[in-house]
Image (cartoon, grey):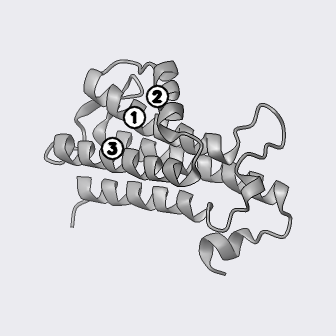
């Protein structure tokens, strides 16, 4: 069977699921801990994922570079200080991205040119590009977890080993 748009969407779901595995069992002190000032905290990383989802949708709609400052300010305001609210916001922005992709692009050929963060890409490369954000930020969370808790077992948490 040929590789399809649905396979791309499933890959995107898997990458976000992988990211969320990294959050399981976080201690309260780990959400805002930073190994150095320039590093994003885990809370800031979740806000960044909301911005990524919204920026992706904006670029797909307008074919222009998104207004990142406005998107960050809106995500921070929408997230508030409650972690449950932030996690719901991440889930909602991802659902909106998936819905938009499926509604607008599911019937188009994978070589259709689209705009990702203001840059042209083929649809077949654009959807996996969103996954790269999930995997990158999962690495950030893993780094913070290992640095703040040397007993954290990455392989058990992520792969069940």
Label 1 environment density (alpha carbons within 10 Å; few <14, some 14–19, many ≥20):
many
| Residue name at image x 18 percent, y 40 percent | 104
**x then y, percent, for residue 102:** 22, 48
Point out the image quarter for the C terminus.
bottom right
Q: Is residue 157 above or below residue 114?
A: below
Q: Which of the two discs, 2 and 1, sits closer to the camera?
A: 2
Q: Residue under circle 3?
A: 97
Q: Secondary structure at mark 1?
A: helix
Whole-percent x and y of residue 121?
35, 31
Mark 1 and mark 2 in contact (Cβ < 8 Å)? Answer: yes
x%, y% of residue 127?
A: 36, 44
Please tell me which of labels 2 and 1 falls first in the chain. Answer: 1
Give SS at disc 3: helix
Closer to the N terminus: mark 2 or mark 3? 2
Residue to which mark 2 is pinned: 74
Residue displayed at 33% across by 54% down: 8
Q: What crowding class fits label 2: few (fewer than 14 Cα within 10 Å), some (14-19), or many (20 or more)?
A: some
- Tell me: residue 62, above or below residue 38: above
Q: Which residue is mark 1?
A: 54
- In the image, farthest residue toward the left: 107
Q: CA distance from mark 2 to mark 1?
A: 10 Å
- Visible residue check, residue 68: yes
| Cα separation between marks 1 and 3 | 7 Å
């Amino acid at each position: 069977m040929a590789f399809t748009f649905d396979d791309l969407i499933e890959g995107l779901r898997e990458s976000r699921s992988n990211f969320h595995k990294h959050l399981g069992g976080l201690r309260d002190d780990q959400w805002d801990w930073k190994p150095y000032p320039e590093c994003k905290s885990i809370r800031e990383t979740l806000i960044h994922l909301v911005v990524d989802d919204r920026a992706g949708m904006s670029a797909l709609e307008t074919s222009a570079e998104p207004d990142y400052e406005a998107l960050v300010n809106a995500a921070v305001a929408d997230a508030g200080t409650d972690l449950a609210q932030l996690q719901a916001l991440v889930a909602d922005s991802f659902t909106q991205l998936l819905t938009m992709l499926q509604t607008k692009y599911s019937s188009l050929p994978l070589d259709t040119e689209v705009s990702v963060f203001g840059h042209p890409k083929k649809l077949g490369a654009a959807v996996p590009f969103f996954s790269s954000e999930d995997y990158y930020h999962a690495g950030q969370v893993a780094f913070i977890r290992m640095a703040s808790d040397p007993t954290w077992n990455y392989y058990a948490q992520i792969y069940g080993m």
